[in-house]
Amino acid sequence: ILDDSPNAKAEKELMESNRLKFFFELEEGVNWLRGKGGTMRRVMMSSAMGVSALLAALSGVMLAWPDLPSPFIISLIALMFAWAATEFYIGFSRPVEGLEPSHPLIKISRMVWLMFVVYSWLDFKNGWTRVSLSPWLVISMLVLCFAALLIRLWAVIHLGTSFTYDVKRPAGNVLIRTGPYRFVRHPAYLGIIILATFPGLIVGSIAGFIGLLLTTLVQTLMRMKAEDKLLE
């Protein structure tokens, strides 16, 4: 028997209204979580490079500074802090709109790179594979590293908001051939390769330098390949 009384109709309308309200709030909650997930993804991608450089600098402070302070080491640690600050500036001032290459080798190489950073500092302190280098050679490499940081910053500033840590198709599918891109196709990556590898050689750690070079090349070349593929 159907109850068509006004009270029954009102109760049905109230139930229907509550159900619609529940699904509406559920959809809002899902959208909020998606937004938070996107924000966390942007924060993680934007800060990853800066955190790596900062950890490299802090490991130098903890492992090499107390016992063997020298103008070269102080300059190298200052360079790493400047690199970290630059990466944080880049990360939080540029959009994250594309995709980040997720190959396992990239993630593994990042962790192994940091291990070789620590090894290089320990090698500098304990002399496992350390070699003595000419002061002028060390100075030249420090100057090269500071120049690499400036080149990377120049490339980022020249691209403006078109520069991102993720991989995306450039606006209009047009390659930039001005500024530092007149001389090198990937000046920002060139700066990273120098910044991420030469510190091992500056402290005289041959094994550390080789490890830093290999792990940096794995990450950089795979990202360059992903970017070039978008332009095909």
Image (cartoon, helix red, strand yellow):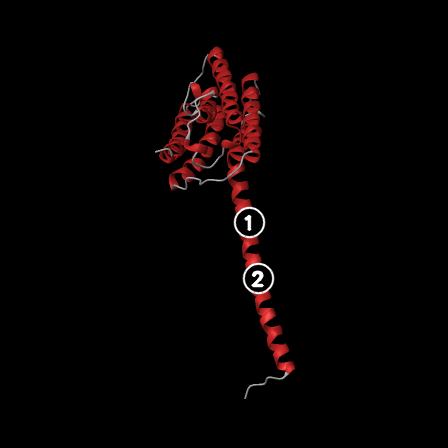
x and y percentages locating residue 142 in the rendered image: 50, 17
Which residue position is annotated with label 2? 24
Describe residue 91's horizontal placement relative to residue 177 as left or right. right
| Residue at the extreme right | 7
Residue 204 appears in the picture as rendered? no
x and y percentages locating residue 7 in the rendered image: 65, 81
x and y percentages locating residue 131 in the rendered image: 43, 18
Camera-side residue of 160 and 216: 160
The N terminus, quarter of image? bottom right
Which dot, 1 or 2, sits closer to the camera?
2
Disc 1 element:
helix
Label 2 environment density (alpha carbons within 10 Å; few <14, some 14–19, many ≥20): few
- The residue shown at (62%, 77%) is 11
- The residue shown at (51%, 44%) is 41
Label 1 environment density (alpha carbons within 10 Å; few <14, some 14–19, many ≥20): few
Residue 157 appears in the picture as rendered? yes
**Type of amino acid under label 2:** Phe
**Type of amino acid under label 1:** Gly
Camera-side residue of 196 and 35: 35
The image's mark for residue 158 is none
Which residue position is annotated with label 1? 35
Q: Pick whichever of labels 1 and 2 is earlier in the sequence.
A: 2
Q: How many marks?
A: 2
